[in-house]
Amino acid sequence: MTSRSKALLAVAAVVVILAIGVLAIVLSARYATSHVPGQSVLAIEIAGPIPEITQANPFGELFGGRVVSRQDVRDALVRAATDTRVRAVRLKVSEFQAGFATVAELRALLAAVGKSGKLTAAYLETAGEFAPGNGQYLLASACKRVVLNPLGDVNLTGLSARTPFIRGTLDKLGVEPDFPGIGDYKTARNFYTQKGYTPAEREMMTWLLDSLSSQMVAGIAAARGIEPARVQELIAKGPYVGPDARKNKLVDELADWATFVEATGKTATGHLEEVSLRRYLRAGRPNRSGATIAVLVAEGSIMRGGDGSSLFGGDVMGSDTMARAWRQVRESDAKAVIFRINSPGGSAVASEIIRAEMVRTGARMPVVVSMGDVAASGGYWITCGARKVIADPGTITASIGVFGGHLAMARFWEEKLGVTWGRLDGAPNADIFGSLDPWRPDQKVVVQKFLDRIYDAFLERVSAARKLTRAQVDAIGRGRVFTGEQAKARGLVDELGGFDEALTAAKKLAGIAPAADVKLEFYPKQRPFWQQMLDRSDGEEARLRTAIKELLSGRVQAPGPIWLPPIDVR
């Protein structure tokens, strides 16, 4: 055996020994921390991003905490509501990134725990620090007791919307935006073409703010035992320093974290042992036995191909991945499917691929849509054909409309950078998808034909799914965005509620008794951790190469013609 072979063998042996050691540590940690004492306080912290589900990472538990998902918190609180070992829930609310629908779902789960006779207590270091704290306070207010750090504030300021526009920048650069679309309310294109709100966009943003504001007022009023009119008055006079927040009954006490922990760690019957969310979930989750209900999670911008990360921020829901997941569901023993959607849309082609696979699955078993924070544009397209559509009142949805376009950048290249382009076209429309020159009138006719075709298909699918005429869909379409509450009033969704309301509906449609336990099987199926990392790296690298190539050739593209950019309401 050569020296090289001996060295490689030694390295391999060391790697194996280390792997065995790491595995032993992980397994021993799991065993040691999965026990739930007879008198426990469940400790949960809400901070950072809150995805729908988390991807399994065997090293996450060894080298630090993993991201907490909505499903993690849901499973823990559903179980805690009936678990006699859990006597209280201690919630720490820090800055987090989630929409109103997620906040509403978590509030409902906390309320259910409180109704079961258990203490629920929330701690706020501050609800906003020189920043809006509406979402943080709204979530914390769901608990029976709310405690604020003595130096903290309650920045309950009311909701506002801020929308950037880059038309002025484009004008300075000599870039000409050309973005036709259908519907004055399909406002994604305004980012490029306007310098401020159009009358239609201002009208739409106003009705969204009004709906979300009324929901926030109602939630705080019910939880804190304050009249809605008084809550509106408090919001109008906000924000509040800690003592004023307590004086106005927005919080119950001012105390530091150690004092809060001590107070929530004991009851009349004795001391409560703290059990972390991760430890509690290791000990078991609900919905792990009985008839199978599949949960297909659709999260991110919709694009053709596999999953990955979007250059516009957030995850990508790949049509290939979703189509494969639907086929796997059809081949499973599932009795029903919950199609959990949290997406602003994107590609029309990819949306139709996903929708068609959903309809094929629906022919074999009932499909119930559960909308998360956003299910708009393409995210609404993929709901068409489900047996039942359920949205949270705060879900951002609809946006039945289409847009497309390009940036004519010839002047920018020549006047700002001194770059000129030779032009040689083999046909009259060879450059129609280029981004040097503005579209000619005859090319605009062709582009509009493309957009009309997509919009007509959108109207057709919504009309058939919602039992509305095309004229009725068009009247509430044209790009209009609604909250779930507003969408239900217009017949675009069937019921209001969160994931558990969708679960109840799925059980009913599958003929499963309401009280019967079920097994939730999640799709798309997770690949091995190492494969996830490789696939994500490959996908992100490919998208980066494509973006650089498009930029150098003068093209800037949004995720697709049925895409809704994030609506920033705080």
Image (tube, grey):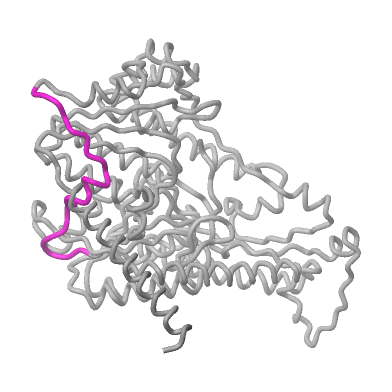
x, y (%) of residue 323?
A: 38, 74
x, y (%) of residue 391?
A: 34, 50
Residue 518 vertical placement versus 153 (above, below): below
Who's the residue at 18% across and 49% down the image? 32
Residue 508 lies left or right of residue 53; in this view the side is left
- Where, quadrant-wise, is the N terminus in this rendering? bottom left
Q: How many marks?
A: 0
Residue 480 lies left or right of residue 489; in this view the side is right
Residue 219 lies left or right of residue 438; in this view the side is left
Residue 36 lies left or right of residue 218; in this view the side is left
x, y (%) of residue 132?
A: 51, 30
Report the front residue among 542 and 439. Answer: 542
Residue 419 vertical placement versus 43 (above, below): below
Report the front residue among 142 and 258. Answer: 258
Q: Quadrant of residue 259?
A: top left
* Residue stretch rendered in magenta on the structure: 269-293
Who's the residue at 28% across and 20% down the image? 225
Does the stretch in magenta take in 194?
A: no
Who's the residue at 27% across and 56% down the image? 25
Q: Is residue 273 visible?
A: yes
Q: Quadrant of residue 297?
A: bottom left
x, y (%) of residue 263?
A: 24, 21
Report the front residue among 223 and 545. Answer: 545
Q: Is residue 387 visible?
A: no
Residue 510 vertical placement versus 304 (above, below): above
Does the stretch in magenta take in 290?
A: yes
